[in-house]
Amino acid sequence: MITSDIHMHSSFSSDSETPMESMIQGAVAIGLKTICFTEHLDYEYPSSDGAVLFEVDMAAYEKKLFELKNKYKNDIEVLFGIEFGLLPHLADRYAAVAEAHDFDFIIGSSHLIPAPWYKKDLDYIREHGTAPKDMIHGDPYETEFWEGRTAEDICEKYFQTIINNIAAYQNFDAYAHIDYLIRYAPEKNKGYTYEKHAAVLDKVLSTIIEHNLALEINTAGYKYGLGQPNPQADILKRYLELGGEKITIGADAHKPEHIAYDFKKAEELLKTLGFKYYTLFKKRQPVMLPL
């Protein structure tokens, strides 16, 4: 039985309004033994209004987490984590954060496809022969990202970002939701299979394995109506075939009601595929737990 959810967010992430204590209380209420907060840190995340997005107040975050960790120590284990929104040129900035804090767990994610991407940027480049200073990277979460495009158009480019990000920076523990873009595609995961992108996905999975990283199974895919987690079953199966063993499990919850979302489905899927263990991290060291 899975009793640990190690990918969740609170109001220290810009996309959540839930107090950290409410998330902890929600986890206690459903009987979890361990949780890990992994607040979003995405340097250079695009903002149309100039607001600072996805930059964590690390001092306040760390102080509150350890305060609540102690308060609830008899009820649940609370771990200290972070989710880096990776881009190759940001490697040094993330390295400094990893060095400065005693994290239990660091997630690496690809949220952005490096610019140029949006039509306004491309139009500017065509007209001026150079990029605008405020040229933004593209996030599949944004509706504008999909104008005139389908997942089929950009899957290969997105998966290549994972390979590029790992080549530039490896000081993290697990790569999260490696087919994140499918959540927000106009037709979701309709027609999307491992076989269609086997060559690049094999490179992604092999790169994760070669660098001794874990692969995350993110159950938010069920919440988004995919009928599958991120990544979906055929990719998880291929990871195991290639020799991957370390699987972390997180619901990517931003509200208490989404903590450990459909973990039973995820557990059954992993067992069916042949996985024997799942992994959590403490002080950056993997702990293998039986399914």
Image (tube, rainbow, N blue to C red):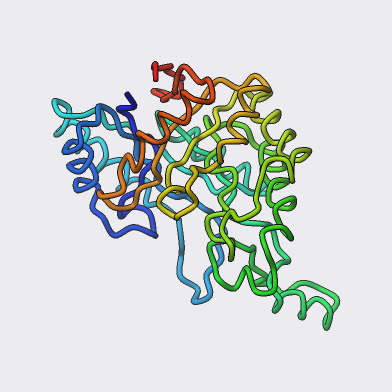
User: Between 255 and 61, which is closer to the camera in this rendering?
Assistant: 255
Question: For the point 55% across and 40% down, which residue is it?
Answer: 108
Question: For the point 32% across and 39% down, which residue is it?
Answer: 260
The quarter in which the N terminus is drawn is top left
Q: Position of residue 9 (x, y in %)?
A: 35, 48
Q: Position of residue 77 (x, y in %)?
A: 25, 28
Q: Position of residue 102 (x, y in %)?
A: 40, 30
Question: For the point 65% across and 25% down, which residue is it?
Answer: 209
User: Between 17 and 262, which is closer to the camera in this rendering?
Assistant: 262
The image quarter containing residue 290 is top left
The quarter in which the C terminus is drawn is top left
Vertical side of 75 occupied by 8: above or below: below
The total number of labels drawn is 0
Q: Position of residue 58 (x, y in %)?
A: 37, 46
| Extreme-bottom residue of the structure | 127
Question: For the point 40% across and 29% down, which residue is it?
Answer: 267
Q: Is residue 74 left or right of residue 218?
A: left
The image quarter containing residue 127 is bottom right
Q: Is residue 228 left or right of residue 65?
A: right
Vertical side of 196 occupied by 124: above or below: below
Q: Is residue 44 left or right of residue 3?
A: right
